[in-house]
Amino acid sequence: ILNVEQSPQSLHVQEGDSTNFTCSFPSSNFYALHWYRWETAKSPEALFVMTLNGDEKKKGRISATLNTKEGYSYLYIKGSQPEDSATYLCASNQGGKLIFGQGTELSVKP
Amino acid sequence: DTAVSQTPKYLVTQMGNDKSIKCEQNLGHDTMYWYKQDSKKFLKIMFSYNNKELIINETVPNRFSPKSPDKAHLNLHINSLELGDSAVYFCASSHGEGALGETQYFGPGTRLLVL
């Protein structure tokens, strides 16, 4: 099992700020890269599954890009709102197993 | 309707006891998973079952035994509980076997505390 790393570990922004964070994953034997949003005491909620190099996905104010050759993905949030506060997890699909990073904890202050 | 449900939500028990956590999904998925959130808050895969057949077993101690009575249920039985088993356990499900990047849908977690 090869590691997945996310940075930063935590991020504090003001309402209205745009922000982004990084997920690094093993580029060899790539299957898919997943992004999840996880609020405390709730289930992780799927945001995106990305499979192709150069993929860009968007859901409202949240978007993600994928570079499978160099092994990274960026998640962007445009105009952060307090309800965006959560931990954002990425996971590399390694042959059917999701290997998760430790998450980026985002806090958006009104 | 809850897509992936787990019972109980909280479980407090003594060291040495045997306990079970139940998971049910009503999404019609073929594959179900158990993950453990470790002390560093990483989610780590423990097991997966596809149509009641074990397909992933991540060298979890054999005190942990998953049981799948049908493809909508995957229960986790833990024998002789140890202090280090205290964690949050998450169930998930997906279409197919997950290797093609199918989304995994997670339950709310079961918080296990072993005293």
Image (tube, rainbow, N blue to C red):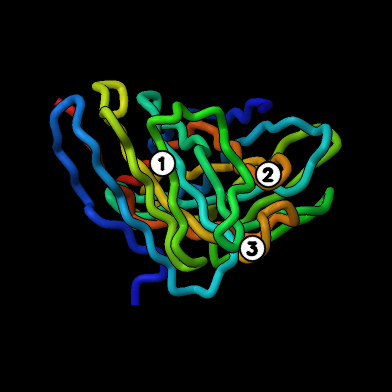
Q: Position of residue A100 (x, y in %)?
A: 55, 37
In three-dimensional space, the C-alpha distance between marks 3 and 1, rounded to whole angstroms, equals 19 Å
Q: Residue B107 appears in which quarter of the rendering?
A: bottom left
Q: Looking at numbered disc 2 in the image, what kind of residue is underneath it?
A: Asn
Residue hosting label 2: A93
Position in image of residue B94 (x %, y %): 58, 62
Above-or-below relation of A77 to A91: below
Q: Are marks 3 and 2 on the same chain?
A: yes
- Left or right of A3? Residue A41 is left
The answer to whether B109 appears left or right of B51 in the picture is: left
Q: Nearer the viewer, residue B64 or B94?
A: B64
Disc 1 packing (10 Å; few <14; some 14–19; many ≥20)? many
Is B77 drawn above or below residue B84 in the view shown?
A: below
A17 left or right, relative to A69: left
The residue at 42%/41% (across/down) is: B65
Instruction: Find residue B113 and name its label.
Output: none
Horizontal and vertical percent position of residue A60: 55, 67
Q: Quadrant of residue B50?
A: bottom right
Amino acid type at image mark 1: Leu
Q: Residue at x 32, y 37 (%)?
A: B78
Q: Residues within 10 Å of mark 2 (few under 14, many from 20)?
A: many
CA distance for labels 3 and 2: 20 Å
